[in-house]
Amino acid sequence: MSVDFETAVFNSLPADKGLYMPTFFPQIDKEMMSEWGKKSLSEIAFDMAYALLKDDISAEDLKAIIDEATNFDAPLHQLENDVFVLELFHGPSLAFKDFGGRFMSRIMAHFLKREQKEIQILVATSGDTGGAVALGFLNVPGIKVTILYPKGKVSLIQELQLTTNGNNIEAIAIDGTFDDCQALVKKAFHDEELNGKLNLTSANSINISRLIPQMFYYANTYAKLKDQFEELIFVTPSGNFGNIAAGMMAWKMGLPISRFIAATNSNDIVPEFLETGIYNARPSVQTLANAMDVGDPSNFVRILDLFDDQLPELKAMLTSYAYHDDEIKRAISEVYKTKDYVVCPHMATGCLAVVTDKMLHPNLEKTAYVVLATAHPCKFPDVFSELGIEIEEPEQVKEMYQKEKISLAMGNSFEEFKAFLMK
């Protein structure tokens, strides 16, 4: 059953327990794309968003939302002649999810202002989502946010970003994994009693409004590189697979992308699936790249939907490689030593994937690899301390150390979580 965009944003999960997707993907005008080299990130973002949402939000309102949500840059850093880093950590929470969090909060506020109602957001985080959502929704009228994170499995800075906000943001440390947190959130959305009492919605990447703004920086990167290279390969560190699903949605709208590479850690469910054709969801394992510690990536069903569940067509467009912690640490050290550039554990998997892919495709010409740097390295101080690499902390991080950390400890029982929400 089709619904309008507002319904998809606030319901998050359809009644059939699937995920919302656009019913069709309008094609970006090629003449418009040819002019993107002269446009800013926010102008390109508007072109993408308006093509998709023009029946749901006026051009004036959408432009105001995008201008406010994307008021920071996503610069490219050249590592090699044909390898670029897309730095997505220049927003408030120092992670790529600022694009989704800020856009979603303003979209919701736009609809809420019109309808004069209040909502309760539930979000599970393996690291960076929570910080982006907390800062994106902080003090937004009519919205209360509850963030679930796995106790002891996020970095100190990530935890501070979740637990030092107060006001309309509350954090719960769950005794379990990210998958446990995500399962609690999903069960809450399908619980009739809870939904009868609360206006529940999600800010995870299961919410389609999180993915739409993540298309913007793929388009902006194409605009910057289109005159230098004929082919673009995007290398995306992937956990819940929302970021790469967004890139594929942009491709579906006509953005000229040759291929996607999903770089993963020891949670190698998708690389295994692409090799064997068998999707074997399993409990996640903890790694240095903790934001990718996902054993059953929710957004992979969206990727399958984009390809009508046709594995050969999917494999032609998507490659995926997995790397262990020892390889990640070596990659961080190697990039720092040879390029004088610091990469976080997630981006390190992307750098490794470029090396692997070049070995398998040695004769690519006029092709650029773009590795998405999804988080600022300062979020992972223990890793860099072990490797003897000093990280300069941004000012907003230093300020967080002075704030009180407030969180509630809870087991992974749904009954306990439900009782907490009902109160």
Image (cartoon, helix red, strand yellow):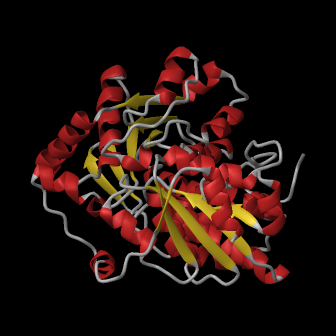
**Residue 177 image point, x, y percent:** 46, 46
Residue at the image point whose x is 55% and y is 75% from the top: 169
Regarding residue 39, the answer to whether it shows in the image is no
Give 359 or 115, whichever is nearer the viewer: 115
Residue at (58, 84) in percent of width and height: 139
Q: Nearer the viewer, residue 324 or 286?
A: 286
Q: Residue furthest right?
A: 1
At 68% from the left and 72% from the top, the residue drawn is 423
- Position of residue 404 relative to residue 126, above or below, is below
Q: Is residue 247 left or right of residue 322?
A: right
Provide residue 352's location: percent of width, then percent of height.
29, 35
Instruction: State left or right for residue 121 relative to residue 366.
Output: right
Q: Could you tell me residue 25's position as x and y percent?
A: 75, 47
Rendered residue at 61%/42% (across/down): 299
Report the number of numbered marks: 0
In which quadrant of the rendered view does residue 114 lie? Answer: bottom right
Q: Is residue 365 left or right of residue 339?
A: right
Q: Nearer the viewer, residue 32 or 274?
A: 274
The reply to whether residue 361 is in sight is: yes
Q: Position of residue 95 (x, y in %)?
A: 42, 62
